[in-house]
Image (cartoon, grey):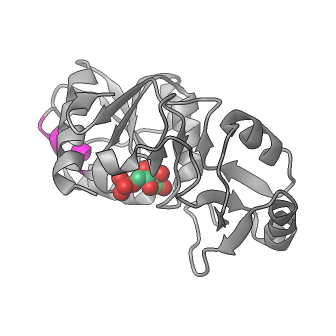
């Protein structure tokens, strides 16, 4: 992992921000560099839609207005990090437990610019345990369904998401068909969000300051 590459990626994403924009903002250590860079443009943008309480606090601290997605409508740009990224720009996200709001904003945005360091690039998704946000009462049920599919579910004990839910991390999956797995898991009652971004992959991936 390279903090320098994370910084480069966060700063490089600024080139996608247009004057007057409302920018969708993800969560995590790479996005933190983006928010700091965005602060320099705060007089040229209308504001941001935030994917987490953590990013909301950061945005407000640097003086960027945080807007409600229900009021803004569709966005032109979403900038976020990832835990893994394959050659098709499909992602695993949710290492910071912000996957649900991240997926909502990604879906609402015309362009998703993903900012990563080179350690996140993989041939096959799944070495990073796949985060799944679940309704608390469904934790065991979802765990059994994952075991049936050959995964090893580990409850992220003590973590409560911004939405009041829990997170299960699935170890041991080599994900050959990300879109198929995402669709299959989305059918299980109690799963709120699967941290696979295959149906809606990134549009642009910046690895440091280099376009992938
Ligand atoms: O829930 C967290 C997000 O999906 C993050 O974007 C992801 O974990 C990457 O975070 P970082 O930039 O800190 O590696």
Across and down, in percent, residue 16 comes to 27, 22
User: Seen in the image, is 189 located left or right of residue 172?
Assistant: right
Q: Residue furthest bottom?
A: 158
Residue 35 in magenta? Answer: yes
Can residue 189 be seen by looking at this rendering? yes
What residue appears at the point 11 percent right and 37 percent down from the top-left corner?
A: 40
The one of 182 and 23 positioned closer to us in this rendering: 182
Residues in magenta, as a range: 33-40
Q: Residue furthest left?
A: 40
Dividing the picture into quarters, in which one does residue 148 lie?
bottom right
What residue appears at the point 45 percent right and 23 percent down from the top-left corner?
A: 203
The one of 40 and 117 positioned closer to us in this rendering: 117
Residue 65 in magenta? Answer: no
The one of 64 and 211 positioned closer to us in this rendering: 211
Which quadrant is the C terminus positioned in? top left
Magenta portion: prevailing SS class: helix
Which quadrant is the N terminus positioned in? bottom left
Across and down, in percent, residue 168 comes to 67, 67
User: Seen in the image, is 152 located left or right of residue 190?
Assistant: left
Q: How many marks?
A: 0
Can residue 63 be seen by looking at this rendering? no
Dividing the picture into quarters, in which one does residue 191 lie?
bottom right
Whether residue 32 is situated above or below residue 205 in the rendered picture: below
- Figure quarter occupied by ligand 1: bottom left
């Amino acid at each position: 992992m390279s903090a320098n590459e994370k910084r480069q990626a966060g700063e490089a994403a600024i080139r996608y921000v247009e004057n007057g924009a409302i920018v969708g903002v993800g969560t995590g250590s790479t996005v933190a560099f983006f928010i700091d860079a965005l602060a320099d443009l705060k007089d040229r943008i209308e504001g941001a839609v935030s994917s987490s309480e953590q990013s909301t606090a950061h945005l407000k601290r640097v003086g960027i207005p945080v807007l409600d997605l229900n009021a803004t409508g569709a966005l032109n740009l979403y900038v976020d990090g990832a835990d893994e990224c394959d050659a098709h720009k499909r992602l695993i996200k949710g290492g910071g437990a912000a996957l649900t709001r991240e997926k909502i904003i990604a879906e609402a945005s015309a362009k998703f610019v993903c900012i990563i360091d080179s350690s996140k690039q993989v041939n096959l998704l799944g070495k990073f345990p796949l985060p799944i946000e679940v309704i608390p009462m469904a934790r065991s049920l979802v765990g059994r369904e994952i075991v049936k599919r050959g995964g090893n579910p580990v409850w992220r004990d003590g973590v409560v998401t911004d939405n009041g839910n829990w997170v299960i991390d699935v170890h041991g999956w080599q994900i050959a068909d990300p879109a198929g797995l995402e669709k299959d898991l989305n059918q299980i009652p109690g799963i709120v969000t699967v941290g696979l971004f295959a149906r809606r992959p990134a549009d642009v991936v910046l690895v440091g300051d280099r376009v992938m």
